[in-house]
Image (tube, rainbow, N blue to C red):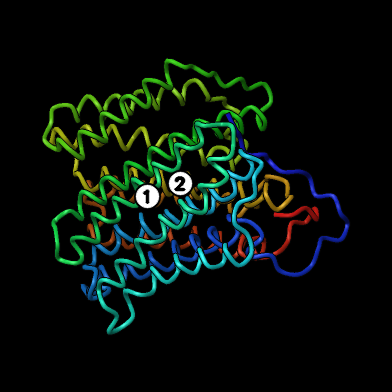
């Protein structure tokens, strides 16, 4: 099973000069993801408070859910896979102009809905094309490589493209499938997170924490994917099924099993490691809350935010920080500002998920406060990592 190298210590006394924004996939897409995570949240909070629809194609809440999943999150997925697949297979992925064109396609998909007089079908088509284009980019190295398990990313991305199609069919007035598309996309992103987390978290822990011995259990992994597939299929095909409750409990339990098997107290001394573990904790909490929501004991939308802002937001912020440092030849130690960002993003999720249940603040204030903390986190990331993403590796190696 492939892992992501942690990077090397910086070697040259004088780092290479110039620019390298398209030297490897993580560079443009992590930059775009960070900027969109910052700007999309600013726009979302402003739209929420003013009640103004963001575009003629999207209503306010629908735009927020679509852009955070099919915009912000797909940029992170693209950056990660275009980088990791090269490491896992030893075969080059997109760089230079082809990578720039793929990034441009993603960007046009974000901007076109705000452009007056553009046909709705063109908005839908441009946004939808990004995931198929990513599949085309990843297909050659994944198919040529010997490790067949990595090929699972291709049907996973195809499922995400199908989920986006379900969304846009409603946007074009042809169906009423947008919510199904959002739910399917969320579950596929979580499945990807579970798969990638299974590769990187025990590896990172063993390398970074002296004396740690994360346990591997084939039975545990089988139960993880079994329960999650039951959950996903039930929510998509049988949304009122009794299977949802035990499936949600099963996902939470199997992820807790992972947490116990991988946990070591030393992780709390490593901010770039504990942020990934807190992302795993939000995955556990999110599915516990999903179970409570099925029993009408917890609001459904708040349980969803434990998974989106919590599991996805926290985990991906940590992964972007770690991958960027490792793949630019730097030591994998974030500065104190990023350590603060890791704390603030977890606080933002607590405020978004749990504070609305109290009488301390109004619901609107909770959204504004959580959104503001999210913006601060990604502003810190942009100020810290954008120069790193744009510059060549400091050890002189390609990538």
Q: Secondary structure at mark 1?
A: helix
Q: Say which residue label 1 marks.
A: 309
* Residue at left offset 56%, top offset 67%: 100
* Residue at left offset 32%, top offset 63%: 368
Relative height, residue 228 to residue 359 (above, below): above
Name the quadrant of the N terminus: top right
Q: Is residue 297 visible?
A: no
Mark 2 or 1, nearer chain start:
1
Relative height, residue 267 to residue 358 (above, below): above
Q: Whole-percent x and y of residue 181?
A: 25, 51
Name the quadrant of the C terminus: bottom right
Circle count: 2
State the residue in front, 372 or 253: 253
* Residue at left offset 47%, top offset 50%: 77
Q: Quadrant of residue 106?
A: bottom left
Q: Is residue 106 visible?
A: yes
* Residue at left offset 68%, top offset 40%: 6
Q: Say which residue label 2 marks.
A: 314
Q: Whole-percent x and y of residue 130?
A: 41, 60
Q: CA distance from mark 2 to mark 1?
A: 7 Å
Q: Secondary structure at mark 2?
A: helix
Q: Whole-percent x and y of residue 183?
A: 25, 46
**Mark 2 touches mark 1? (CB < 8 Å):** yes
State the residue in front, 124 or 72: 124
> Left or right: 26 with respect to 348?
right
Farthest-out residue, bottom: 117
> Left or right: 238 with respect to 74?
left
């Amino acid at each position: 099973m492939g892992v992501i190298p942690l990077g090397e210590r910086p070697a040259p006394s004088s780092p290479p000069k110039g620019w390298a924004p398209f030297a490897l996939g993580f560079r443009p897409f992590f930059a775009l993801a960070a900027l969109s995570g910052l700007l999309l949240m600013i726009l979302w909070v402003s739209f929420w408070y003013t009640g103004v629809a963001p575009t003629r194609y999207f209503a306010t809440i629908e735009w927020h859910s679509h852009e955070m999943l099919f915009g912000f999150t797909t940029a992170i997925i693209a950056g990660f896979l275009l980088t990791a697949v090269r490491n896992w297979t030893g075969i080059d992925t997109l760089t230079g102009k082809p990578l720039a064109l793929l990034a441009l396609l993603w960007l046009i998909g974000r901007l076109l809905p705000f452009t007056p007089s553009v046909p709705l079908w063109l908005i839908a088509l441009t946004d939808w094309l990004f995931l198929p284009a990513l599949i085309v980019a990843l297909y050659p190295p994944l198919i040529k490589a010997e490790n067949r398990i990595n090929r699972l990313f291709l049907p996973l991305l195809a499922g995400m493209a199908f989920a986006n199609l379900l969304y846009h069919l409603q946007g074009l007035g042809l169906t009423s499938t947008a919510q199904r598309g959002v739910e399917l996309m969320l579950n596929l992103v979580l499945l990807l997170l579970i798969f990638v987390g299974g590769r990187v978290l025990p590896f990172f822990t063993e390398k970074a924490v002296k004396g740690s011995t994360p346990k591997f259990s084939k039975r545990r992994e089988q139960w993880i994917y079994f329960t999650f597939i039951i959950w996903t299929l039930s929510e998509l095909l049988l949304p009122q099924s009794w299977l949802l409750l035990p499936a949600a409990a099963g996902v939470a339990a199997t992820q807790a099993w992972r947490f116990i098997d991988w946990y070591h107290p030393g992780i709390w001394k490593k901010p770039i490691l504990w942020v990934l573990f807190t992302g795993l904790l939000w995955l556990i909490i999110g599915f516990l809350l999903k179970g409570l929501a099925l029993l009408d004991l917890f609001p459904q939308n708040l349980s969803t935010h434990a998974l989106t802002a919590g599991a996805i937001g926290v985990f991906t912020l940590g992964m972007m920080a770690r991958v960027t440092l490792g793949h630019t030849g730097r030591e994998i130690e974030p500065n104190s500002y990023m350590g603060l960002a890791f704390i603030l993003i977890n606080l933002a999720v607590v405020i978004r998920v749990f504070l609305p249940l109290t009488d301390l603040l109004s619901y609107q204030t909770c959204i504004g406060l959580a959104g503001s903390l999210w913006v601060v986190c990604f502003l810190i990331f942009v100020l810290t990592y954008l120069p790193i993403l744009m510059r060549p590796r400091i050890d002189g190696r390609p990538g």
